[in-house]
Image: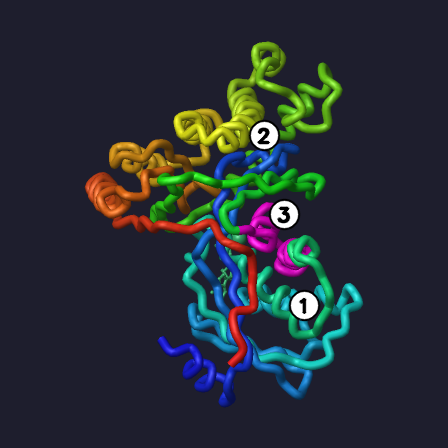
């Protein structure tokens, strides 16, 4: 597809600038961001791109080649559009920026083209939001730093698009650095970079291709269950969140929480938080054996105790292990979407074939397996 030609077909003029933003995976620390824990995401080489030109008027006009629709709106008339959900992710950023007092002196034509699968847990929504905010910052010279670009994108997703979400996705994308992951405290938005130097090993992404269903209601249920667990434990411990307890307390926690389901949820949260720290230690020591053990333990905990995996994610993780992965686990919210596996780079082609065969045989669905690099956050690609 010739994007310049596509741009011309839609806007009857030529693009002048192009930008891109990456997707993200979370290496470990799943479902603990809303429990005061730390997560370990990184930006990956699957991109959403935008071709842009400036307009003389005050109209933002956006076209997505993935959706194949065009929407236009005056900057001063932006409001939530129920019918055309996707354009809220574009217009919403301009709305939030204006609301915050930034001056947006003219409109833009924006053509979007993405290779990030939508609704598969690689955060296509955060990538789009961060991309648009990055573009606005660059073109209008707003002098917003990357951390605040992430915050504005989250504000837009929460307040304009109406989706409750934490800062992990936007932070991982906006602050991505090549061959580093982000040890991120979501409650305070504090972070540090950890080297992801894996030598001959690499992470790969495994997409289950399961259509997503009921993710939001199941997600909210888990949030509620954790709140119940916390309320019980607060009567015995001086804590504000579950991640303030460490694994040594689990025996005692078992005695305090009578409800088996609530106990299992809390057990996942406390043990997963511990695994994040162990994982960082293992990364620093380049201890592949420990990294693999932790990936497997994380998946097991999400499967047995937190119950957010499901047949598709479990099967693809089994497939990865059978195909020779050192370790594998689901990534993102679960209930479908993607998993990650740690493999020896040189075995990729064979690994991919084996995973496809195993998964297809069990579920009659073809999965996707792709190699990735750990990459920088958003960038201005070129001027035409
Ligand atoms: P994900 O896990 O991929 O972030 P979400 O449901 O959070 O899934 O976000 C997906 C939504 O983001 C889409 O329904 C659409 O509104 C928007 N979106 C993502 N990528 C694109 C794109 N390439 N073009 C238009 N809209 C997109
Ligand atoms: Mg999303």
Q: Is residue 151 left or right of residue 326?
A: right
The answer to which of marks 2 and 3 sits earlier in the sequence is 3
The residue most toward the right is 101
Q: Residue at x 70, y 68 (%)?
A: 95
Q: Which residue is mark 3?
A: 167
- Is label 1 in a helix, a strand or a loop? helix
Labelled disc at residue 137: 1
| Residues at marks 3 and 1, CA–CA distance in whole angstroms | 19 Å
Looking at the rendering, the stretch of residues picked out in magenta corresponds to 151-177
The answer to which of marks 3 and 1 sits earlier in the sequence is 1
Q: How many marks?
A: 3
Q: Is residue 289 left or right of residue 89?
A: left
Front in this rendered view, residue 181 or 8: 181
Q: Residue at x 44, y 55 (%)?
A: 45
Q: Is residue 262 above or below residue 215?
A: above
Nearest-to-viewer mark from 2 and 1: 1
Nearest-to-viewer mark from 3 and 1: 1
Q: Is residue 232 magenta?
A: no
Residue 255: image location, x then y, percent:
59, 10
Residue 306: image location, x then y, percent:
49, 29
Q: Residue at x 73, y 65 (%)?
A: 143
Mark 2 neighbour class, 10 Å CA radius: few under 14, some 14 to 19, many 20 or more:
some
Q: Which residue is mark 2?
A: 225
| Residues at marks 2 and 3, CA–CA distance in whole angstroms | 21 Å
Q: Are marks 2 and 3 in contact (CB under 8 Å)?
A: no
The answer to which of marks 2 and 1 sits earlier in the sequence is 1
On the rendered image, what quadrant is the N terminus found in? bottom left
Mark 3 neighbour class, 10 Å CA radius: few under 14, some 14 to 19, many 20 or more:
many
Q: Is residue 218 above or below residue 133?
A: above
* Render colour scheme: rainbow
Residue 200: image location, x then y, percent:
36, 40
- Is label 3 in a helix, a strand or a loop? loop
């Amino acid at each position: 597809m010739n994007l310049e030609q596509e741009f011309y077909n839609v806007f009857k003029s030529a693009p002048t600038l192009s930008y891109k933003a990456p997707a993200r995976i979370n290496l470990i620390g799943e479902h603990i961001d809303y429990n005061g824990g730390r997560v370990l995401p990184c930006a990956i080489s699957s991109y959403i791109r935008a071709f842009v030109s400036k307009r003389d008027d005050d109209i933002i006009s956006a076209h997505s080649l993935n959706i194949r629709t065009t929407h236009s709106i005056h900057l001063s008339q932006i409001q939530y559009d129920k019918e055309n959900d996707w354009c809220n992710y574009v217009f919403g950023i301009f709305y939030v920026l204006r609301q915050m007092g930034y001056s947006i002196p003219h409109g833009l034509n924006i053509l979007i083209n993405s290779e990030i699968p939508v609704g598969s847990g690689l955060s296509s929504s955060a990538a789009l939001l961060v991309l648009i905010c990055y573009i606005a910052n660059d073109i209008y010279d707003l002098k917003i730093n990357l951390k605040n670009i992430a915050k504005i994108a989250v504000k837009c997703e929460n307040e304009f698009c109406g989706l409750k979400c934490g800062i992990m996705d936007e932070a991982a994308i906006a602050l991505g650095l090549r061959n580093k992951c982000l040890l991120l405290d979501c409650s305070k938005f504090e972070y540090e970079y950890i080297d992801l130097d894996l030598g001959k090993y690499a992470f790969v992404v495994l997409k289950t291709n399961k259509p997503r269903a009921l993710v939001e209601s199941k997600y909210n249920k888990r949030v509620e269950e954790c709140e119940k667990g916390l309320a019980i434990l607060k009567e015995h411990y001086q804590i504000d969140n579950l991640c303030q307890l460490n694994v040594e307390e689990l025996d005692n926690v078992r005695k305090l929480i009578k409800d088996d389901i609530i106990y299992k949820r809390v057990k996942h949260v406390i043990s997963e938080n511990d695994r994040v720290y162990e994982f960082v230690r293992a990364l620093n020591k380049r201890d592949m054996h420990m990294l693999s053990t932790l990936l497997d333990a994380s998946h097991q905990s999400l499967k047995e105790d937190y119950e957010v995996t499901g047949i598709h994610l479990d099967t693809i993780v089994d497939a990865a292990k059978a195909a020779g992965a050192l370790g594998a686990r689901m990534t993102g919210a679960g209930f479908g979407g993607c998993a990650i596996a740690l493999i020896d780079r040189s075995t990729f082609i064979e690994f991919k074939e084996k995973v496809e065969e195993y998964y297809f045989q069990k579920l009659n669905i073809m999965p996707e397996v792709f190699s990735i690099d750990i990459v920088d956050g958003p960038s201005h690609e070129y001027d035409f």
